[in-house]
């Protein structure tokens, strides 16, 4: 058996199935088109339209073949063992009715034995218990009976759900030898030990599961296969652990260099190094595909993987930012196959560095949380819920929490912690769709059925604002109907349309659809299924039937305004990259008729000077009257020529390029002006943060920009009139007035402080000794800072260290504060206990430390009763 690198296996697989007649397809994004999926977790996800025959493969091909990048985190606690990974590559080949079991089994056997050179005696095969056909195919290829096992439905029958596409599957295993097995004489494929390693699963999707449990044949028999690249690489490289393969072992070497620890000398260190190597690949590819850290959805998965890698790095002695060392190695190892990690390298590095710094602050917050938990601890055990909060919210590994608790002589309720973890796992399992099966489970629906039946809608709206077409389908209240009439709200599907469907941030067109005796207002245009345009209408007059011919007319003035704003987003994108740097990537947009919004990646606030320069650069391109041009080309050719692909966007084989001279070249399917001069000018109206490493610009163009500037001028004139100064002296006069107001405010506070100090003598005169000096006083009108200031004054004038209880009513709200010196606390005063005892008088609650505590309430009338209660309590 010849040693093969991961790169060699990947290319041999793709080339093998290409030669059999399959079309080599690029990996799809980790952000799937299917809204039911959080992340792309299997190779078949991108082929949903083909399996449903909504989209047909070029007749010259019998199927497709891919190497798909995948991320799965439902087994995150197992990552770091021999097999489990969060990021992996899935080799696949797929047929949509052109070849089936015989060809698939034959080719799988041929590739395994002849291309890879795997020893036949090491190969084992499992089949569904009733699938005699597949057993006979394997036998015809020379596989011995003893190497074929029948397994039940749980192991060898694939289902998308209770109903829908399903079928038997056959898995191929490699015998790694008894030395890595469980030692049981009954050990066989399907055993939980590592002896028999499953590396290829061939799914024969041939049935449609019915509600009564019967299996109806599908119109066509499909093939869906998956071979884990890391697993087959382990076999071909003579190792029994995915992490000992060439790519992952190179990443582990980065960890060895950074930590100074040697791999395979300590089990705990080894697992941490493996986890970091795995997670670093996941975060690199996720960011490259447009996922940014956040507290929900994909962004939460990314953030969790990032933080988990950082945690594990701390356990092996890696301090400070380090993950970009892994990014550089990943780009070197995999960039030739996945150019997106090269294109977005700087962005990946900046996002990771920012997140590492952010997590450092979170760790410090967690330490504060733990310190407060120690103060309030009753007994010697930290609750499982608190340990889980540290783990889930602050990223503390439970073993770190245990170590910090042990230093205080405190135990951790691990049973409670595990209950919380299990509850979280159940939530994750419920929320996470189950790998590829979930992608099938949502197939269908009225729009999918229409697309399958009538085909894609032809869009002619780049060049025409009106067109005649036949009515292909009508939808009313979510159901297909044969006709619609005046007063109805419905969806109209045409064979071709000039209406642009909402996509890529650009809003859908509006207008009218007219026929003989019929008129409907188009209030929006959507594409609920890729390729299917639905006109959302309100019928004004007449009736419309499926099969009728109508004329669709776009609101041309509105479209022109949208086109100006869309082209302007391209100019702003290029200007931002020119002014701020190439790390800037578009991360979302809204393009409407009246305004535009542009989200972009950046790691700090944009200064006024930078924003002004962005605006100037964009307007320069508008004033230069740059002709716009569009053309279609292949995705590879576009990338090679340096066209900007939008961050996180998914593209097909053929792409549309939109150019503004040499200044801006982007892939885009939207509507644009013919010349930048049509935009008029652009005015940026705001710039703000909308998340970690994400900024937003809002702007207006053309007549809306003119209206905005006229409004600004009007406001400026009114302000100048109020201030009684010339128009361009408004700023200077306003600044002078603000300075005067600030001076008055400072004097007011000083006078208030002097008044408070003036009453200090009275409060000192009422001081009592209860084993330490004590003042109980009411001083109204103080805020929280004023209360603390009053205590500072009292403490400084007491004859010896003491304590106080102060009540105040400020803006009709009662507040109590207790405070003491360390000496008074040692003598028995406890501010937290005092506040808890008296806060009920003001219908409030609060607490704090022995040296200072505070409570707010709802009943101001009870403030004096609260102070009397404090006097009585402390006198005892």
Image (cartoon, rainbow, N blue to C red):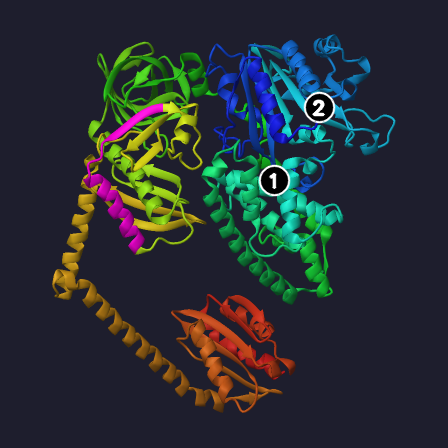
User: In the structure shown, which secondary structural element does the residue marked by tag 1 occupy?
Assistant: helix
**Quadrant holding the N terminus:** top right
- Kindly report the distance in space between the C-alpha atoms of the residues bearing marks 2 and 1: 23 Å
61 lies left or right of 827: left
Instruction: Give percent across and percent down for residue 213.
Output: 64, 16
Determine whether 686 is above or below 214 in the image.
Answer: below
Residue 383 appears in the rendering: no
Task: List the residue tagged with mark 2.
Answer: 154
In the image, the segment drawn in magenta is 609-632
Task: List the residue tagged with mark 1.
Answer: 427
Query: Magenta includes 23?
Result: no
Determine whether 19 is above or below 291 in the image.
Answer: above
139 lies left or right of 226: right
Mark in front: 2 vs 1: 2
Category of crowding for the residue at label 1, using alpha-carbon neighbours closer than 10 angstroms: few (below 14), some (14–19), many (at least 20) = few
Residue at 39%, 39% in the rendered image: 588
Determine whether 316 is above or below 571 in the image.
Answer: below
Magenta: predominant secondary structure element? helix
């Amino acid at each position: 058996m010849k040693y093969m690198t991961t790169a060699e296996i990947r290319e041999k697989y793709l080339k093998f199935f290409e030669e059999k007649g399959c079309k080599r397809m690029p990996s799809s994004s980790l952000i799937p088109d299917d809204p039911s999926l959080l992340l792309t977790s299997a190779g078949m996800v991108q082929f949903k339209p083909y399996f449903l025959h909504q989209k047909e493969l070029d007749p010259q091909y019998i199927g497709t073949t891919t190497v798909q990048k995948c991320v799965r985190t439902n087994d995150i606690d197992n990552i770091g063992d021999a097999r489990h990974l969060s990021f992996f590559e899935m080799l696949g080949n797929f047929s949509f009715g052109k070849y089936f079991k015989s060809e698939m089994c034959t080719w799988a056997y041929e590739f395994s034995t002849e291309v890879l050179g795997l020893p036949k005696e090491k190969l084992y095969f499992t089949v569904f218990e009733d699938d005699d056909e597949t057993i006979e195919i394997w036998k015809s290829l020379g596989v011995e009976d003893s190497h074929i096992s029948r397994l039940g439905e749980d192991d060898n029958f694939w289902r998308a759900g209770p109903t829908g596409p399903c079928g038997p599957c056959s898995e191929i295993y490699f015998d790694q030898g008894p030395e890595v097995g469980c030692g049981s004489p009954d050990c066989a494929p399907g055993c939980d030990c590592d002896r028999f390693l499953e590396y290829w699963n061939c799914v024969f999707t041939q049935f449609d599961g019915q509600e009564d449990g019967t299996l109806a044949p599908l119109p066509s028999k499909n093939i869906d296969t998956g071979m884990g690249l890391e697993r087959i690489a382990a076999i071909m490289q003579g190792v029994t652990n995915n992490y000992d393969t060439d790519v992952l072992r190179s990443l582990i070497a980065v960890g060895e260099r950074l930590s100074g620890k040697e791999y395979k000398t300590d089990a705990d260190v080894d697992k941490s190094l493996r986890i970091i190597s795995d997670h670093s690949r996941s975060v690199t590819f996720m960011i490259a595909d447009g996922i940014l850290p956040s507290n929900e959805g994909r962004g939460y998965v990314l953030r969790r993987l990032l933080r988990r890698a950082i945690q594990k790095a701390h356990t092996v002695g890696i301090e400070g930012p380090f993950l970009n060392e892994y990014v550089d190695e990943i780009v070197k190892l995999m960039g030739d196959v996945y150019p997106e990690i090269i294109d977005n390298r700087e962005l990946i590095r900046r996002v990771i560095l920012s997140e590492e710094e952010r997590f450092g602050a979170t760790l410090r917050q967690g330490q504060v949380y733990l310190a407060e938990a120690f103060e309030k601890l009753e007994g010697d055990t930290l609750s499982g819920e608190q340990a889980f909060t540290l783990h889930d919210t602050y990223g503390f590994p439970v073993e770190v929490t245990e170590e910090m608790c042990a230093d205080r002589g405190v135990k951790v309720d691990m049973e409670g912690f595990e209950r919380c973890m299990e509850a979280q796992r159940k939530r994750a399992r419920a929320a996470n769709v189950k790998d590829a099966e979930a992608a099938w489970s949502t197939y269908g629906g009225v729009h999918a059925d229409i697309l399958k039946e009538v085909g894609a809608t032809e869009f002619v709206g780049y060049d025409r604002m009106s067109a005649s077409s036949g009515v292909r389908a009508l939808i009313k209240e979510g159901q297909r109907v044969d006709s619609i009439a005046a007063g109805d709200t419905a969806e109209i599907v045409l064979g071709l349309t000039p209406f642009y469907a909402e996509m890529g941030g650009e809003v859908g067109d509006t207008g009218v659809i007219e026929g003989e005796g019929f008129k409907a207002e188009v209030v929006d245009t959507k594409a609920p299924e890729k390729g299917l345009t639905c006109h959302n209408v309100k019928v004004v007059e007449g009736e419309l039937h499926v099969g009728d011919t109508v004329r669709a007319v776009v609101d041309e003035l509105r479209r022109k305004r949208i086109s100006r704003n869309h082209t302007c987003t391209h100019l702003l994108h290029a200007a931002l990259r020119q002014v701020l740097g190439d790390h800037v990537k578009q991360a979302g947009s809204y393009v409407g008729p009246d305004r535009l919004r542009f989200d972009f990646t950046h790691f700090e606030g944009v200064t006024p000077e930078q924003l002004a320069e962005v605006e100037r650069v964009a307007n320069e391109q508008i004033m230069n009257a740059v002709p716009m041009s569009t053309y279609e080309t292949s995705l590879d050719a576009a990338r090679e020529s340096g066209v900007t692909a939008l961050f996180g966007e998914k593209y097909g084989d053929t792409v549309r390029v939109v150019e503004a001279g040499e200044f801006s070249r982007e892939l885009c399917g939207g509507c644009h002006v013919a010349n930048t001069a049509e935009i008029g000018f652009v005015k940026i109206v705001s710039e703000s943060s909308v998340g970690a490493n994400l900024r937003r610009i809002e702007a207006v163009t053309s007549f809306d920009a003119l209206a905005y500037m006229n409004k600004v001028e009007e406001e400026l004139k009114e302000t100048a009139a109020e201030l009684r100064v010339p128009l361009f002296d408004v700023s200077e006069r306003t600044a002078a007035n603000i300075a005067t107001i600030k001076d008055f405010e400072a004097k007011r506070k000083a006078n208030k402080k002097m008044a408070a100090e003036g009453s200090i003598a009275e409060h000192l005169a009422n001081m009592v000794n209860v084993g330490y000096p004590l003042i109980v006083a009411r001083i109204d009108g103080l805020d929280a800072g004023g209360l603390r200031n009053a205590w500072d004054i009292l403490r400084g004038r007491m004859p010896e260290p003491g304590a106080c209880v102060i009540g105040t009513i400020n803006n009709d709200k009662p507040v109590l504060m207790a405070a003491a010196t360390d000496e008074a606390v040692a003598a028995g005063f406890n501010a937290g206990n005092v506040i808890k005892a008296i806060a009920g008088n003001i219908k409030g609650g609060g607490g704090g430390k022995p040296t200072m505590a505070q409570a707010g309430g709802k009943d101001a009338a009870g403030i004096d009763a609260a102070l009397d209660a404090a006097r009585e309590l402390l006198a005892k």
